[in-house]
Image (cartoon, helix red, strand yellow):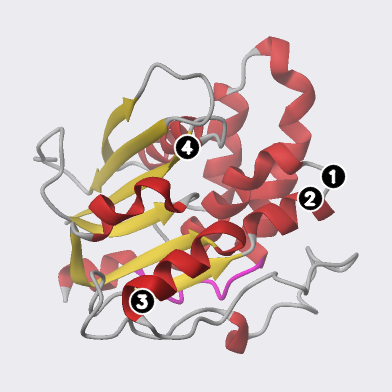
Amino acid sequence: MQAEVILTGIGGQGVQLCAKALAMAAVAEGREALLSSHYGGEMRGGQTEASVVVADAGLRSLPILPSTWSAFVMHPAHWAPVAAKLRPGGVVVANADLVAGELLALDGVGNDLVGNDLVGNDLVGNDLVGNDLVGNDLVGDDGATSGCARVLVAAESIAGELGAPMAAGFVLLGAYASATGMVGTASLVAAMRDLVPPYRAQHVEANERAIVAGAAAVAPGSHPVWTAVTA
């Protein structure tokens, strides 16, 4: 079994670091992983994209994916080419603070939001998380993502409430891992700790809070990856 995710955003959102953490977490849990990165020369604001393929064993995949089971969308700027690669039955986990309007433009279907106008002091607890808050609607037949489920998480709002606005990518990563079950939250945290360089060690605790908050913001296992890819 193998499953793919394409992560897309713009420079400065931590997309590449999130992709590395996801791949490392998968390997730590005994799976095989392939990571491929694509980005421009700009430090911030330019296109940044990565793909991660995770498999039980015997991983076989092209470095540039022709299609993908899932997508991790931090910014809409380069979303359209990724949407075209999504297979029916897949899942899109997106930053609702920036991406919701772009998804609506593709399919014209309303979206339920996680964490938008609901972020408060009890964010990390379960009081604000209900099954009705996760975007499980199917994308309409006219959309580029026809037949795919959506989980929209207000990642930037959540990160801001945590006092860690630069950790929005890790909020979305925690939500992706929790919703799909591709890797566990503890493995993600451990991978992030290994990846953050010593000169940025002051961000480690905030990044961990972001991952945990993102995982808490969605219904765990709402879109299980290994069930989907074997169906």
Disc 4 crowd rating (10 Å Cα; few below 14, some 14-19, many 20+) is many
- Spatial CA distance of label 2 from label 3 is 26 Å
Residue 200 vs 151, above or below: the answer is: above
Q: Secondary structure at mark 2?
A: helix
Residue 120 vs 78, above or below: the answer is: below
For image coordinates 54% across by 26% down, the residue present is 44
Q: Amino acid at mark 1?
A: Gly
Question: Is residue 21 left or right of 81 when viewed as pictured?
Answer: right
- Asked if disc 1 and disc 2 are in contact, CB closer than 8 Å, the reply is yes
- Nearer-N-terminus badge (2/4): 4
Magenta portion: prevailing SS class:
loop
Q: Amino acid at mark 4?
A: Ile
Q: Amino acid at mark 3?
A: Ala
Toward the front, the furthest residue is 105
The front one of 110 and 120 is 110
| Image location of residue 19, percent across then percent down | 42, 37
Q: Secondary structure at mark 4?
A: strand
Give the quadrant of the C terminus: bottom left
The circle on residue 149 is 3
- Nearer-N-terminus badge (1/4): 4
The circle on residue 160 is 2
In the image, which residues are magenta? Answer: 217-224
Q: Which residue is denoted by mark 1 in the rendering?
A: 163
Disc 3 crowd rating (10 Å Cα; few below 14, some 14-19, many 20+) is many
Disc 1 crowd rating (10 Å Cα; few below 14, some 14-19, many 20+) is few
